[in-house]
Image (spheres, helix red, strand yellow):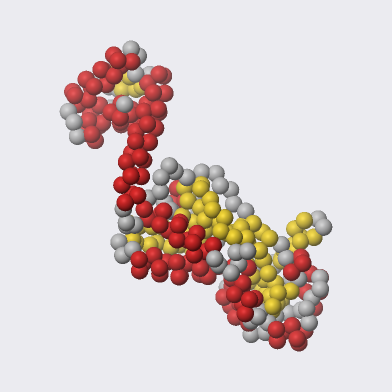
Amino acid sequence: MRLFARVVEAGSFTKAARGLGMPKQTLSRRIAELEAELDVQLLHRTTRSLKPTEAGAAYALRCAEIVRLAEDADRAVTDAKAEPAGVLRVTADPVFGEAFLPALIAELAREWPALQLEVVLTRRKVDLVEEGFDVAFRIGRVEHKGLTATVLGPAQVRYCCSREYLKRRGAPKTPKELARHDCILVTHEGEPVRWPFKSARGLELVAVDGRLRFNSQALAHAAALAGLGIAIFPEFTCAADLRSRRLVAVLDDVAPEVGGVTLVHPSGRYLSARVRTFVDLARQRLASAPWVR
């Protein structure tokens, strides 16, 4: 069955034999024996071409799947005892990645010297399979088609300012009152800024403006800590500040939850040692994060 799958994949006995490292005549004889045993013609043979019959094409798909399952079983056994090694490719949202990946990556690099790590931070939704990534952290509501997903915590937003600003300007009681406050804006490509709020109609986007405009969450965070206005942050970036009272939350009654922080990797019947180690460690470390309620 393995040999037949390789012949159909290669499209010729010559190419398949070369790839398998066996004589072409031996390979041809083995396939003929398979056809005789099944009493079904699997291949159309001519001097110039080799094509599977209708029955052969369907059989080849089943054979390839069985071979893959057997190879998966072998790898699962060997990887269970193997130490993480090779290249691990990780992608994440930049805000989340900068907040949480440094400690995680440092721990992995110290613990597993044979492991190579490549981390790409991007707002773009990466196709893990097409672009060759092992794992991704995604923010918000994500489609899990073809992926195994673990929700690490909520993607709640919080509106924050310093205690100094709160004493000086007071707290807005409704989103409309933000028009009378200094809002610290994070913009992308000069787009208008709208902040999300819960309302009777569901999620409502309210336009906000301010004299401080950045394309960096880190700069907005520093400005909020300095008492320069109200900013919006994902809870995973400001939870520690709220607990220590370096920042104070306002408008919490209308602050929406916008999905979750999810760890995803391509679905499969087994995980390599490097992916399994990363996923397990990420779940352990991030499960106790201050923003996970």
In the rendered image, the vertical position of residue 39 relative to residue 172, given as above or below: above
- Which one is in front, 97 or 284? 284
Residue at image coords 53%, 50%: 149
Q: Position of residue 43 (x, y in %)?
A: 33, 19
Q: Quadrant of the C terminus?
A: bottom right
Q: Quadrant of residue 277?
A: bottom left
Q: Is residue 235 left or right of residue 79?
A: right
**Looking at the image, which residue is at 60% across and 67% down?**
291
Q: Horizontally, is 271 left or right of 227 in the view? A: left
Residue 63 drawn above or below residue 111 = above
Query: Is residue 230 shown above or below 167?
Result: above
In the image, 147 versus 196, the foreground residue is 147
Please state if 22 lies on the left or on the right of 246 as rendered.
left
Coordinates of residue 57 in the picture (x, y in percent): 39, 23
Q: Position of residue 3 (x, y in %)?
A: 28, 28
In the rendered image, the quadrant that contains the N terminus is top left
Which sits in the foreground, 54 or 291?
291
- Work out whether 54 lies above or below 119: above
Q: Give the quarter of the image for residue 176.
A: bottom right
What residue is rendered at 24% in x and 35% in y?
A: 19
User: In this orientation, does residue 224 appear?
Assistant: no
Q: Position of residue 164 (x, y in %)?
A: 70, 86
